[in-house]
Image (spheres, rainbow, N blue to C red):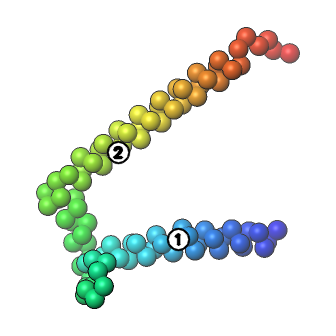
Amino acid sequence: MWGGLLLGLAVYILFGVAPAAGNLLISFTNYSGLAGSSTSFTGFANYTALLTTERPGFISSLWATVVFVTGVTILQNAFALLVAHRLKGESRPC
């Protein structure tokens, strides 16, 4: 039992926690991904630029994502309830 639990935890840390921590650390630098380019610590400058007028499309795209996710969730659940109701049909309780 513990072996399976430890294996699952190791996979979660390897493919979930470690990449998320790495991305968080990289987000505080000016890393470009180009070979040979220098990288320095920028602090919250990237987040400030993202949430101010320097990047005007970010807030509108974030809002569009929220609307899309909400709409898809509501439509999927409505469709699933309709299909479940149709599949159940006119059944009588036992």
Residue 49 visible to an observer of this rendering: yes
**Can you say which quadrant of the picture contains the N terminus?**
bottom right
Residue 33 vs 60, above or below: the answer is below
Name which residue lies at 21% across and 72% down. 45
Q: First in sequence: mark 1 or mark 2?
A: 1
- Expressed as whole percent of the image width and height from the top left, the position of residue 48 reads 21, 65
Which one is nearer the viewer's eye here, 43 or 32? 32
Callout 1–callout 2 Cβ contact below 8 Å:
no
Q: Quadrant of residue 25?
A: bottom left
How would you rate the neighbour count of disc 2 (Cα within 10 Å): few for under 14, some for 14-19, many for 20 or more?
few
Q: Quadrant of residue 87?
A: top right
Q: Is residue 45 left or right of residue 20?
A: left
Which one is nearer the viewer's eye here, 32 or 55? 32
- Expressed as whole percent of the image width and height from the top left, the position of residue 41 reads 27, 83
Residue 31 visible to an observer of this rendering: no
- Expressed as whole percent of the image width and height from the top left, the position of residue 4 reads 77, 69
Q: Furthest residue to the right?
A: 94
Identify residue type, mark 1.
Val
Name which residue lies at 35% across and 76% down. 26
Which residue does the numbered mark 2 point to in the structure image?
65
How would you rate the neighbour count of disc 1 (Cα within 10 Å): few for under 14, some for 14-19, many for 20 or more?
few
SS state under label 1: helix
Name which residue lies at 81% across and 14% down. 93
Q: Quadrant of residue 31?
A: bottom left
Which residue does the numbered mark 1 point to in the structure image?
17
Identify residue type, mark 2.
Thr
Q: Is residue 67 left or right of residue 72?
A: left
Name which residue lies at 78% across and 73% down. 3
**Can you say which quadrant of the picture contains the C terminus?**
top right
Tell me the distance, in whole angstroms, between the alpha carbons under discs 1 and 2.
Answer: 24 Å
Residue 42 vs 58, above or below: the answer is below
